[in-house]
């Protein structure tokens, strides 16, 4: 072996040894967080950032003319896609809200299942005028709906069925001036009749409350069930104000219905009252 | 042909009123679109024609509802007659005047409705009837005048020219 070759081999061995040592010394677990590599990365990070940005810009500039081909068509497609997604978003919101309403109805139905059989129905029409208050539901005699059945929401009483066709029924709301509901003030058990004022008025009046009854604003009113078409104990509304009737013999009260009768979408029809409940009601 | 078209248009309007219009009710009060079409058409057409248009509009509404047939016919006939009579005395091309006429004649119509309800044994307290139903409904109905009056005016003028 010549001297020059031996020198090269020696230098190569030294280089390999140094490299191997450096490799052993720079194992991350041994170096801890402050390795020279990481420090170096910190230094070059802004430069890397800048170069990456420049690269992106360069690619954008180079590819721009190519990407412009068919851009108008793509833009139109995207606009249509946005419109479609927007429409779907609205539809999903609608489903979400419907789902919440139906879940509330289902919950109420479960609670009431011991006492009543309930049929869920959707509102498909309303009285077009402002004097009367009726709604049309999407269930009729074909689904077992009969006249005088009570209609409720989880919030409270809505009204009663007054006309039935095979596939629809008409419900007289408690705000209709033709409506009358035998009721009680929940706290004091003072009886009275809740009658509608006018369809658009949105309030009802409880009349013929005994003069000596303790009746105050804020008290809840429920159906009495006695001699009435409505089952007992269904919430009707809350008293706003109390007045003396012109005869002086009775009191009357203005009541806000608990059910939001202006924006009804789904309601429940009481199709059957269980016999024990009916007997209890007959006994008062 | 227009004797069929007018009731058909009113039929569509009543259908809209009983379905989607509930969504634009303000504190439970809806505008009466049939009343609006009747009074604005009558304002242009005159008293006798107005009474006729009102009666037809009202009877279509009554037949749609299926009860108290004649109630809306009389109400709209009165409103149509009054609007037609006003049209003879006032400048008919002005939307602002038409809006006021729509308000007063609708209000008169709603008050006739209120009186007819007594005839049907449906008692409503006068204060509630005026301030919770008649007045807000007349205001809401009249406020829609600017949206349709010019269209109705032009259509009625074209018809009278054709005749």
Image (cartoon, rainbow, N blue to C red):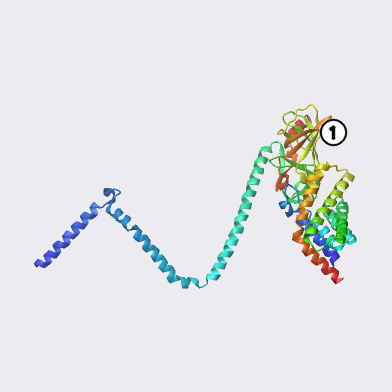
- Disc 1: which chain? A
Relative to A78, say whether A194 is above or below: above
Q: Is residue B53 visible?
A: no
Q: Is residue A22 visible?
A: yes
Q: Position of residue A133 (x, y in %)?
A: 78, 46
Give left or right: position of A75 versus A113.
left
Q: Residue B158: which quarter of the image?
A: bottom right
Position in image of residue A262 (x %, y %)? 73, 47
Residue at (31, 56) in percent of width and height: A43
Residue B19 image-quadrant placement:
bottom right
The residue carrying mark 1 is A246
Q: Is A9 on the left or on the right of B37, as rendered?
A: left
**Horizontal side of residue A245 vs A233, given as left or right:** right
Up/down of A75 relative to A19, above or below: below
Task: Decide: is A140 above or below A230.
Answer: below
User: B33 or A225: nearer the eye?
Assistant: B33
Q: Residue lying furthest top in this view?
A: A212
| Residue A104, position as x, y percentages in the image | 65, 43
- Give the number of marks: 1
Badge 1 element: loop
Location of the N terminus of chain A by quadrant is bottom left
Residue A129 position in % (x across, y down): 80, 50
Which residue: 60% across, 61% down?
A: A84
Towards the viewer: A51 or A266: A51
Q: Nearer the viewer, residue B126 or B113?
A: B126
């Amino acid at each position: 072996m010549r001297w020059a070759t031996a020198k090269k081999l020696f230098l190569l061995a030294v280089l390999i040894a140094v490299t191997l040592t450096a490799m052993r010394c720079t194992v991350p677990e041994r170096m801890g967080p402050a390795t020279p590599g990481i420090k170096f990365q910190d230094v070059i990070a802004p430069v890397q950032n800048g170069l990456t940005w420049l690269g992106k810009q360069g690619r954008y500039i180079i590819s721009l003319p190519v990407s412009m081909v068919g851009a108008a068509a793509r833009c139109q497609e995207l606009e249509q896609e946005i419109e479609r997604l927007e429409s779907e978003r609205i539809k999903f919101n609608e489903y979400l809200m419907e789902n919440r309403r139906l879940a509330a109805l289902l919950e109420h139905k479960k609670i009431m299942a011991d006492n009543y059989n309930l049929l869920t129905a959707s509102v498909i029409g309303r009285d077009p005028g402002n004097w009367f208050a009726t709604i049309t539901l999407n269930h009729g005699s074909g689904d077992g709906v009969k006249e005088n059945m009570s209609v409720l929401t989880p919030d409270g009483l809505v009204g009663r069925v007054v006309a039935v066709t095979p596939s629809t029924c008409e419900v007289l709301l408690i705000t209709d001036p033709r409506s009358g509901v035998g009721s009680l003030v929940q706290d004091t058990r003072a009886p009275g009749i809740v009658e509608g004022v006018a369809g658009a008025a949105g309030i009802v009046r409880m009349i013929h409350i005994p003069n000596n009854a303790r009746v105050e604003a804020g008290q809840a009113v429920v159906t009495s069930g006695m001699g009435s078409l409505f089952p007992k104990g269904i919430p009707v509304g809350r008293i706003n104000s109390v007045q003396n009737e012109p005869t002086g013999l009775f009191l009357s009260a203005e009541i806000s219905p608990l059910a939001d009768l202006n924006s009804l979408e789904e309601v429940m029809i009481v199709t059957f009252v269980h016999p024990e409940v009916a007997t209890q009601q007959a006994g008062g | 042909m227009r004797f069929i078209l007018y009731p058909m248009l009113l039929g569509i309007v009543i259908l809209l009123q009983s379905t989607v219009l509930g969504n634009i009710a303000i504190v439970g009060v809806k505008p009466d679109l049939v009343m609006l079409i009747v009074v604005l058409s009558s304002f242009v057409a005159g008293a006798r024609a107005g009474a006729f248009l009102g009666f037809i509009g009202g009877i279509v509404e009554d037949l749609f509802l299926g009860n108290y047939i004649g109630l809306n016919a009389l109400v709209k006939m009165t409103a149509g007659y009054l609007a037609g009579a006003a049209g003879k005395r006032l400048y008919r091309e002005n939307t602002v005047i038409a809006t006021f006429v729509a308000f007063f004649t609708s209000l008169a119509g709603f008050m006739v409705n209120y009186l007819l309800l007594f005839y049907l044994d449906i008692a409503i307290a006068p204060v509630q009837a005026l301030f919770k139903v008649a007045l807000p409904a007349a205001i809401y109905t009249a406020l829609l005048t600017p949206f349709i009056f010019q269209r109705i005016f032009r259509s009625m003028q074209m018809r009278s020219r054709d005749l």
